[in-house]
Amino acid sequence: SAVISQKPSRDICQRGTSLTIQCQVDSQVTMMFWYRQQPGQSLTLIATANQGSEATYESGFVIDKFPISRPNLTFSTLTVSNMSPEDSSIYLCSVEKSGGATNTQYFGPGTRLTVL
Amino acid sequence: GENVEQHPSTLSVQEGDSAVIKCTYSDSASNYFPWYKQELGKGPQLIIDIRSNVGEKKDQRIAVTLNKTAKHFSLHITETQPEDSAVYFCAAVASGGSYIPTFGRGTSLIVHP
């Protein structure tokens, strides 16, 4: 498995500002992912972040709004830029690790963001 | 692309009863089906998974079944306890390429003491 931590665990921000969320893993991983989970909803993939390459964004998400860094194999950041109340969500990072017969995805505890 | 349907959206049971959550998928290339449990204020936690070459898998009080022909899979929880109360997500992963699951919409399970 993997032990994943996120900072901050929660934050309340003013519209128009930006917040950077950090994700730290206890072991080296190639694939890291960022998800958004709106209240009472399922998980929506924002982007895939591989170390040494540009992040790959899913439809509806753009780098200017959600810039991602992946400086090494245990760390990544997601920035939510120029925030609006619609960005209020839980943001989750996850990693892909070998789980025996197949790879499996493990999630961090999430960052609960409220934008006023 | 893959589409995963999950039912019911809410499930309320008495402690000790069984709970069943059902999912269907559309992509015949999907061959790995993990289930996640998300407790309030926490991230999703992998609780059990099944590959397409297996029809059933058990781990203590939880089990998953897979019908590849019908493209549906289910989570079974027996002897439910209040600590089983959480949101459960099913997911499907297609073979080849990167592991990126398609998630169902989630089932909120409430176990009443």
Image (cartoon, coloured by chain):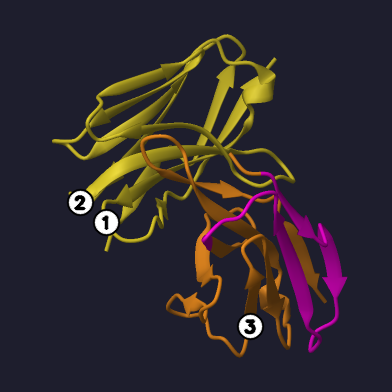
Chain colours: A orange, B yellow
> Distance between the Cα atoms at labels 2 and 3?
32 Å
**Residue name at image x 71 percent, y 61 percent:** A23
Mark 2, Cα crowd under 10 Å, few <14 / some 14-19 / many 20+, is few
| Res B69 → quadrant | top left
Residue under pointer 1: B96
Residue under pointer 3: A67
Residue under pointer 2: B29
Range drawn in magenta: A3-31
Q: Is residue A105 above or below residue B107?
A: below
The stretch drawn in magenta includes residue A12: yes
Q: Is residue A50 above or below residue B56?
A: below
Chain on which label 1 sits:
B
Looking at the rendered structure, the kind of residue marked 1 is Gly
For marks 1 and 2 on the same chain, the one whose residue lies earlier in the sequence: 2
From the top left corner, tell me how far across and down residue B99 is, in percent: 39, 55
Mark 1, Cα crowd under 10 Å, few <14 / some 14-19 / many 20+, is few
What secondary structure is marked by label 1? Answer: loop
Q: Between residues A22 and B67, which one lies in front from this camera angle?
A: A22
Q: Between residues B61 and A108, which one lies in front from this camera angle?
A: A108
Quadrant of the image containing the C terminus of chain B = top right
